[in-house]
Image: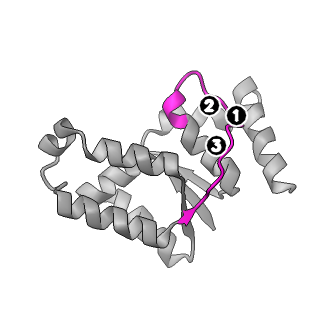
Amino acid sequence: MLAVFDCMIFVQAAANPNGAAMACFERLSQLGGQLCISDAVLLEVAEVFNRSELRTRLRSLTPTRIGQFLDDIRATARVIETVATVFSLPRDPNDEPYLNLAIAANADYLLTWNSRHLTYLMKQDTPRGARILQALSKTQNH
């Protein structure tokens, strides 16, 4: 089982080790699954962690906690080296790296903190939904 988590799942898990986001990491591990990451995802996560307004608001995000959390991710996740841009999302370009990573990794799950932005992609009767399903089926046939 392969999964891709969006940036806010990383942030919430690091900020609250007893919360729902960290439980997602733990459950994936318990089920023998693996988190998939890419350089683009790691760069965004690190950039968000370094935002002073975030660290002011979430005081538990100390440099030590962030460093340990990212080290743990790097040590256990599957790094997908090549992530082609097969799917563009003009409505929310910040989600594109996660969608393209999920496609490149042939992930079983894409977990997002704000599903409102992506639920329309699950509908086969919409142009974007049909395109993402087509992109996913191409990777599953290879």
Which residue has dot 3 on it?
100
Give the number of marks. Answer: 3
Residue at image location 31% in from the left, 52% down from the top: 12
The amino acid beneath tag 3 is: Asn
How far from the left and from the top, in percent, is residue 142? 86, 57
Q: Residues within 10 Å of mark 2 (few under 14, many from 20)?
A: some
Which residue has dot 2 on it?
120
Q: Is residue 41 left or right of residue 80?
A: left
Which residue has dot 1 on it?
123
Residue 4 located within the stretch drawn in magenta: no
Q: Find numbered disc 2 in the image and state the secondary structure of the residue it sits on.
A: helix
Write down the region rendered in magenta.
78-95
Task: Classify residue 122 by image quadrant.
Answer: top right
Q: Find numbered disc 3 in the image and state the secondary structure of the residue it sits on.
A: helix
How far from the left and from the top, in percent, is residue 96? 57, 36
Residue 91 located within the stretch drawn in magenta: yes
Distance CA(mark 3)–CA(mark 2):
16 Å
Residue sitting at the far right: 141
* Quadrant containing the N terminus in the rendered view: bottom right
Residue at image location 61% in from the left, 64% down from the top: 2
Residue 100 vs 25, above or below: the answer is above
Task: Classify residue 25 by image quadrant.
Answer: bottom left
Q: Residues within 10 Å of mark 1 (few under 14, many from 20)?
A: few
Residue 76 vs 40, above or below: the answer is below
The amino acid beneath tag 1 is: Lys
How far from the left and from the top, in percent, is residue 111? 51, 51
Residue 126 vs 135, above or below: the answer is above
